Image (spheres, helix red, strand yellow):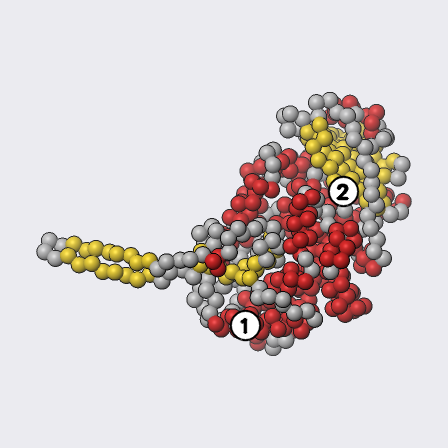
Amino acid sequence: MRRFLLTLLCLILITCSPGTTEESVSEIQLEETTTTESTTTTSTSTTTTVYEEPPFAIDEFGLEIQEPPTEIKEQLAELMNFIERRIGLEFIEEPLYDFYTLNDYQEYNALSFLDDFEEDYEEGEWERAVLSENMWGLNDFSPDQLLNLQVEFQRCFSAGSYNLLDKTLRVPIKSGQKKLNFYEQRVVLHELVHSLQGMHFQISEWYQEMDDLDDFSNYPGLRALMEAQAEWVEDKWVSGLDAYDRQTMQSQIPNISCRVQLPNYFYIPADLYYTYGPILSREIISKGKMAALNDALSEYKNTGLSNLPTSEQIYNSDKYFANERYDNIDISTITIQNFELIDEGTIGSLDLVYLLQDTIGPRPAIQSAVGIGGGSWKDYVDSDGNLVMTLKISGDTEKDLNEIYDAFILWGDTQKRFTGLVEQYNGVIYLGSTNVWISKQNGYVKMVLSQNINIIDEISSQLGEL
């Protein structure tokens, strides 16, 4: 269940991406080349040699990296000084950066996503991820269709990026320019903040540990605070521009548009990072200045994964300052003929918003997600790739549990894809190409999703103990 969400949680390239670069482009040795053209007539022959300026560097995909002139390097130093003053930390080493033309930058994002795709997904895993989205009613795409949309999302959604593993920031600029314009400085400033975070808060190690565990449940909260700090510094820099320069900066924003319509739910994690994260960060800073936000970002370095902020804490600051944690929810393994347990994990607030928002709207989805006690899920698959998904969710209070249950009932009632509804097995079953059993009992919301209604009948005696 979680793998489809991880694609959007962890591969968004606005500020960070998990792809790695195996070879440093600064170490690639490039030789000068010449092109020889020959012109022949009946009486004479001439040869003209035209000199071609060799590229500064070529990345692993054969894309040209732009050489930053001295003036841009000086601008980078000024931006770094600005960041150090605002955050109260110093750059330990020179940041790594690659500048591309806009077209090559977008191409890099697409190619790097596809390059990691085979490693990120085991055989059949992408198909299960897409089927999971289908069964939740997020879309009706085929695996190839969704992959193409994901590639386009990587291509068109990013203004600049910082790679969590190779620690390189990548930004598009105009070819041949001597200085960064205001808009480009703003983007570079944002990514430089992430570079500074990487030097002080063990961001690369944090990501690598989650990747090794194949569990990114600790990703969204810290990512939101990372973006919040970068947004805060960026806002301070913009506020230092006069009205004319701010207007000029607006006119310099490139026309980056997606070539196809992308699903709305693609953008839900970004709303957590760029809307709710900055709201919480301002409260943190007002209570303890920037040192308090630096302390929050140092949590992984100090204590590891166990005490990082949750997505619920990002949505609701009271949860953050109370350091409210998710409960561990034990979900039973059920026996289904010809099916085997394939994956399992936990559920947090962002998961609920991701599943519900497109159907019931942002406010009801977030309201139900803030108040989740904890949640777990297990997925089962048969030899034909059919999927059965089970969930078990608790609330902080009975009222919170009712809100979660009511949100899922509204989610079911609203979708036209369901062809009928029956009350059975102490719950309700929405019937259709996907059959969904929803129940509230013994202090939990429980759900089963199956393509075959007979499976829900088969496991009915186990539902009470789910």
Relative to the observer, which residue lies in front, 67 or 301?
A: 301
Task: Name the quarter where the N terminus is drawn.
Answer: top right
Q: Out of 442 and 380, give the one closest to the viewer.
A: 380
Q: Amino acid at mark 1?
A: Gln
Quick check: 457 above or below 230? Answer: above
Callout 2 crowding tier (Cα within 10 Å): few <14, some 14–19, many ≥20: many
Q: Which residue is mark 1?
A: 75
Quick one: SS at disc 1?
helix
Quarter where residue 437 is shown: top right
Residue 409 is situated, as x and y percent measured from the top left of the image, at 79, 39
Q: CA distance from mark 1 to mark 2?
A: 45 Å
Q: How many marks?
A: 2
User: Is 421 situated above or below 220?
Assistant: above
**Residue annotated with mark 2:** 346
Q: Which residue is located at x 69 percent, y 55 percent?
A: 223
Q: Position of residue 98 (x, y in %)?
A: 51, 60
Q: Secondary structure at mark 2?
A: strand
* Res. 395 image quadrant: top right
The amino acid marked with disc number 2 is: Thr
Q: Residue at x 48, y 59 (%)?
A: 26
In depth, the one of 221 and 456 nearer the eye is: 221
